[in-house]
Amino acid sequence: MRLLTPFAMAILFLALSLTSVAANTAPDNNVKFHTGSFESGLSKANSEGKLLFVEFYADWCTPCKWMDKTTFKNTDVVDLMNTNYVALKMDIENDEGSELKSQYSVRMLPTILIFNSAGKMVDRVEKTLSSDSMVSLLSFHLNSDGHELAVSYPYNSSPTEERSYDKSLDEMYNNYLSAEKNRTNYKVQVANYTDYSEAFKKVNELSEVFIEPIIVINEYVENMTHYKVMMGEFNTMAEAEGFRRILQRDFGISAIIH
């Protein structure tokens, strides 16, 4: 066996040290989800003066997986979440998730609940969120003091004289509500269901044929939840229209552009 010279050993040690430093200082572009229970998440949020962010999901939830790969990888989302929130994922298929699903009347996936540091639920979002929409949502629930509920009164109602109201939050709230409408990308809607199981069945069928991203967007219209199956991520209307024509011509799939 050939031994390394002292000089070679020094070079090897330096290389290993630099590799270790690089690994430790590399940017971590991931939301740091709390691995404990819901109660421990509430306790952590309370002790750190943060908001608690809870996403209800399941392994079979395609929109949930889409958000994992896109929304929760966005640098702005990661920064906002890791700095100001205790983030928790709750699987509705396990015992605790199933119990909380019933307790908080979770009807669709993904469902997002936000609690303030005192443990009071301050928001419920029942839809798939893009990174822009998520940034607007997370930012809305932060004020100058940090980690307090941003708006304590129903939107467009007058606050009581006992407590002050920051009108500058109105614009932030509008940004939150309109973020989806102001997106610059285009998707093609290929189906619309009122039964989520049928929507996810369609997603599986399409995934066997197409490589384009496929998501389900939930919308509540006229007292009924609609599950819209969307395909693609196009930068221009022309690109989306071209894909729509291919779907119609080659696969007999009627679609509309969003």
Image (spheres, grey):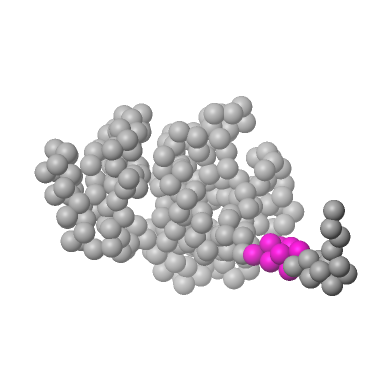
Please check the rendered image and state whether residue 19 is part of the magenta-colored stretch, yes or no.
Answer: yes
Q: Nearer the viewer, residue 189 or 181?
A: 189
Q: Is residue 81 above or below residue 223?
A: below
Of all residues, the one furthest to the left in this rendering is: 249
Q: Residue at x 20, y 51 (%)?
A: 243
Left or right, residue 192 beside residue 12: left
Task: Report the magenta stretch's main SS.
Answer: helix
Query: Residue 172: image x %, image y %?
Result: 44, 66
Q: Residue at x 34, y 33 (%)?
A: 204
Please check the rendered image and state whether residue 102 is part of the magenta-colored stretch, yes or no.
Answer: no
Q: Is residue 23 above or below residue 95?
A: below
Range of magenta residues:
16-26
Q: Residue at x 74, y 67 (%)?
A: 15
Of all residues, the one furthest to the front in this rendering is: 1
Query: Residue 135: image x %, image y %?
Result: 48, 61
Q: Nearer the viewer, residue 42 or 210?
A: 210
Query: Residue 69: image x %, image y %?
Result: 47, 50
Left or right, residue 177 beside residue 89: left
Q: Residue at x 71, y 64 (%)?
A: 19
Left or right, residue 44 beside residue 255: right
Location of residue 234 by image quarter: bottom left
Res. 115 visible in picture: no
Query: Residue 83: image x %, image y %?
Result: 63, 62
Q: Nearer the viewer, residue 254 or 21?
A: 21
Left or right, residue 48 beside residue 247: right
Q: Is residue 76 above or below residue 196?
A: below
Res. 33 visible in picture: yes
